[in-house]
Image (cartoon, rainbow, N blue to C red):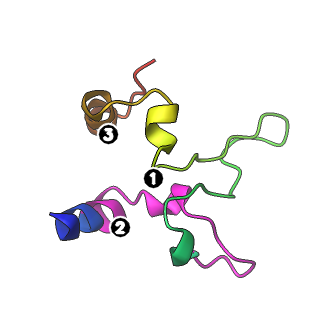
Amino acid sequence: SVNYGQYLVRHVSSCNDCHTPRDAQGNMMMDRELQGGGLNLGTEDQPIYAVPIVGRALPAEGYTRQNFIKAIRTGIRPW
């Protein structure tokens, strides 16, 4: 269900922590939930930003339903 999906995203997997942008005070901008994070998860020389994981963003990254589920379960991207 949608509610169960929201529960998994917001509380179990904590997808929002990286994939939701934050305002100047560090609060998550829930009106832009999962639309890509603005925190640099890498280094200054090699920045890494969490990509959007809503809408057409996942298929554009090469994800299918099957390999997305596998990536979530294993923590390993399919390529």
Label at residue 54:
1
Q: Is residue 76 above or below residue 56?
A: above
According to the image, label 2 marks what residue?
Answer: 10
Nearest the eye: 19 or 26: 19
Nearest the eye: 56 or 69: 56
Amino acid type assigned to the residue bearing label 2 in the image: Arg
Amino acid type assigned to the residue bearing label 1 in the image: Val
Q: Is 44 on the left-hand or right-hand side of 3?
A: right
Tell me which label, 1 or 2, sits earlier in the chain.
2
Task: Determine the CA span between mark 3 and mark 1.
Answer: 15 Å
Task: Determine the CA span between mark 1 and mark 2.
Answer: 14 Å
Q: Position of residue 74 (x, y in %)?
A: 30, 32
Q: Is residue 64 above or below residue 20?
A: above
- Disc 2 element: helix
The residue depicted at 54 percent of the width and 56 percent of the height is 18
- Look at discs 1 and 2 and give the one toward the viewer: 1
Q: Position of residue 25 (x, y in %)?
A: 71, 82
Tell me which label, 3 or 2, sits earlier in the chain.
2
According to the image, label 3 marks what residue?
Answer: 72
Q: Position of residue 12 (x, y in %)?
A: 28, 60
